Image (cartoon, rainbow, N blue to C red):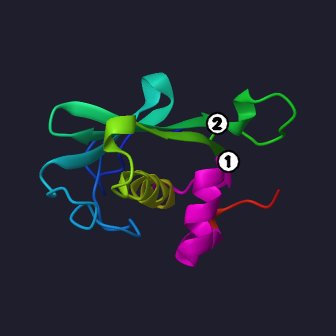
Amino acid sequence: MDHISDGSEPSGSITATDAGITATDAGVTAPDARVLDNPAHERFDLWLGDELVGILGYRDEDDIPGFAAEPGEVVAFMHTVIVEDFGGRGLAAVLVGEALGSARRRGWKVRPICTYVRRYVALNPEHLDILVAD
């Protein structure tokens, strides 16, 4: 799976332009919130300042038994977790929106295993074109 930036975004860093809810809507300022790809742990990390407050785990489907995708073709978004003390602020939406935007820019197709990702896409249908059918 390609985790190397093609120059359209800084290496590992994702902008807030594709989220259905902005960091400001979630009650944080833009400089405080950032989503970074962490390929060593197969996840996107949501940071507020210097604190890791959320993750969205993913796997390349060629690594998952029972799926027939080619390497880098389909990425499964497995689970979304926000630290309990930061819940209820819309941060999961920021994280998922940013991860979907990154997937689009990288040319990934996404299989939403995570129920939160599925609900997010149902409310933000502009991402439907990058999803694969079950």
- Mark on residue 60? 2
Q: What's the residue type where badge 1 is placed?
A: Val
Q: Position of residue 88 (x, y in %)?
A: 38, 53
* Quarter the C terminus occupies: bottom right
Residue sitting at 69 percent across and 46 percent down? Answer: 113
Front-most of residues 10 and 112: 112
Measured as percent of width and height from the top left, residue 130 is found at: 62, 64
- Mark 2 element type: strand
Residue nearest the viewer, comparing 13 with 92: 92
The answer to whether 60 appears left or right of 26 in the picture is right
Element at label 1: strand
Residue 74 - label: 1
Q: Is residue 89 located in the magenta-colored stretch of the structure?
A: no
Residue at image coords 59%, 67%: 121
The magenta-colored residue range is 106-129
Image spot of residue 93 (x, y percent): 43, 58
Q: Is residue 116 above or below residue 61?
A: below
Q: Is residue 20 toward the left or the right of residue 34 in the image?
A: right
Q: Amino acid at mark 2?
A: Asp
Outermost residue toward the bottom in this view: 126
